[in-house]
Amino acid sequence: MRNKYSLVVAILLTYVCTYGQNRQLLYDFNEIPQSLMVNPGVSIDFKWYAGIPATNISFQAGSSGVAVDDIFADDGIDFTEKFAREVIYGMSNTDELSGNYQIELLNIGFRGKNEDVFYSFGIYNEGDAIGYWFRDLAILGFEGNADNLNRRFDLSDLKTRGEVLNVYHIGLNKRMSDKLTMGVRAKVYSSVFDFNSTRNDGYFVTTEGTNNIFSNTLVSDMEWRISGIPSIREAEKDGTLANTITKRAFFGGNLGLGVDLGFTYNISDQTVFTASLLDFGFINHSNDVRRYTLKGSATVEGVEIILPDALTNPNQDFWDDLIDDVEELVPFEENEESYLMFRPSKLNASIRHDWGEQIQSNENCDCGPNVSQGGNRGIRYANSLGGHLYAINRPRGPQTALSVFYQRRIGNILALKSSYTVDKFSFTNIGLGLNLQAGPINFYVLADNLLGYRNLANSRYQSFQFGLNIISWGKK
Amino acid sequence: MVKKFGYFLLGILLLTTLQSCIENQNFDQFDDLRIEPTLEASILYVEAPENIINLAFAANFYSQDFNFDGFSEAFFSDKVIDGVVTYIVENTTSKDLTITVEFVNEAGNVLDTEIFDIDAAPPAVMDLREIPYGGAGRNLDIIRNTSGIRVSAENRGDNTSTSSISDPKVTIRSSGKFRLSVK
């Protein structure tokens, strides 16, 4: 029973996959303060803002290979047959299951004495995990090695990583000129726990034996690294889990550094180019670390007794000797050496064209559609159309997504944004975002892959983000 | 104010369009999942050259008990469904031989016996035998309780002749192919 729900939860929770962390709806949605988190150089007009703690949440989950409905649909088909077809043989080693969430604990921004400079800082909790489908290992587990003579089961199919951490950040956004806004955000990462196994190599193969009938060969260069998990397990036994997690999240775990960079460049009054690089950083895992390795190679043909050599020691335990030999040739070892883990860096770029009715923004400035000087400052257009490119660094290399979007503003109160995203896994991802400004209260909700809501169980990707902020433009 | 309220209602309306549905799923199907891999590996290889057979005074020139915990490991014994043990006995010596392979339990009791009577070479003689366990085959408990293998070899010929085949010897090769119920 527990296994059953573990599988369901694993599929659901690991649903983000390739779109993982792609926030094409939030990106350059500059009515929302959180757009600073995906581009520190976004062009914003707030005097100050404050995110209401724990109300700004994003969740994304997906699977590039299988949907819940593919295997759990109540269709009368034999479950083992479906499982084999859809999961074991239906997914390739580039298919992935992954998930990401972020919960904002604190997010405050304010304009400095220099009106061109905007500061922001805060804390958010993030969880991120990705696991590629370990196809060869799954087939080996499902079929076994019999009748697979000479087939090499690739151990490098095991690639996974995951972490939970708190991110402490402080950002600077500066309007360099009427055309250019640049931003930088420094980050300190406090890891709660981390696990990864991404650089595995080797194979298992069964061949015709030299002496005996079969020969089983294992060539392995595998490593599994964890940090934080041993103390969490210990705390679970002691009943101090909450304390331990809190302590590790607030600088009591492993620390790292990172930076976000971004800019917005007005190519013309109505055409804007933006780009950002996020989470360019690392975490040094040095405390509460365990590294498990399985390195070496061994070939086994069962217990071998060759006379007369085997007669020299009549009490020899050939079985134990065989086991000892294998353990010596392919030792499973454990150590506590520190390791460095680079964060999954993200790259965004967009180009946007604005047109239509000019709307005076809320910005407290001597600018706007009725002021001849100042370029497009203080001006919003009713319509925006653009394209967005996203890339994320993953264990099997960069993954990209391309979106086109259309944004419609209705005064300074309501803004709607729709997007259509394609990547190698989906051609039907339509998203919709809504930003509502009721006085100082800002509410937004962004949802991806709306077509998937027709039958969530059949959807391979969903993301959802919403939040509440208080915004001031400094107007009296 | 009325206009703002109108926009708010529009927002709520849009949100309600996001309502989702989930077609009927049957998660209890997971209980029906059968994962039954078939594993195959060599078990035992014994090689005795003819000159060693000739040096032995007794007809029973070789007898040895081997510890073999492969079958009694919990992972295997608790999950094994059925399987086949394959023997290939090959004789290139000039003697008629009788090879006996016995599976024994922890207490040394014989659980199963396989006897190979092999004629002298030339030509080289090979006996391939597949013994099924479980299902319609022999009792699977034999496999589950085996913790050792006893091999004995009897020379039913002389102690002086030498085969005309190069490198004359008797070899016993064996492998197991077993299906396990993992889930």
Image (cartoon, coloured by chain):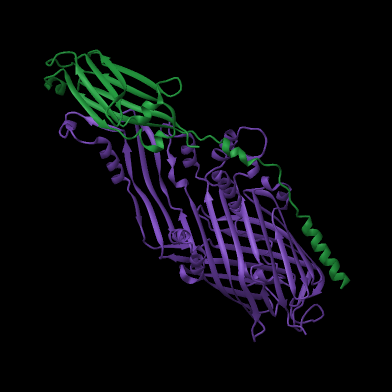
Picture residue at 26% right of the left edge, 16% below the top: B124
Residue drawn at point x = 38 percent, y = 30 percent: B144
- For chain B, give the colour: green
* Viewer-proximal residue among A30 and A441: A441
User: Is residue B124 visible in this depiction of the protein?
Assistant: yes
Count the labels in the image: 0
Q: In the rendering, what colour is chain A?
A: purple
Is A252 displayed left or right of B118 in the figure? right
Q: Is the C terminus of chain A in the top left, top right, bottom left or bottom right quadrant?
A: bottom right
Front residue of this view, candidates A322 and B107: B107
In this rendering, is residue B34 above or below A279?
A: above
Q: Position of residue A413 (x, y in %)?
A: 79, 70
x%, y% of residue A201?
Answer: 41, 48
Query: In x, y percent, where is residue B93?
Result: 20, 17
Q: Position of residue A389 (x, y in %)?
A: 63, 59
Image quarter of the N terminus of chain A: top right
* Quadrant in the picture for residue A23: bottom right
In the rendered image, the vertical position of residue A69 relative to residue A50, given as above or below: above
Q: Is residue A95 visible?
A: no
| Quadrant assignment, res B130 | top left
* Above or below, B149 relative to A54: above
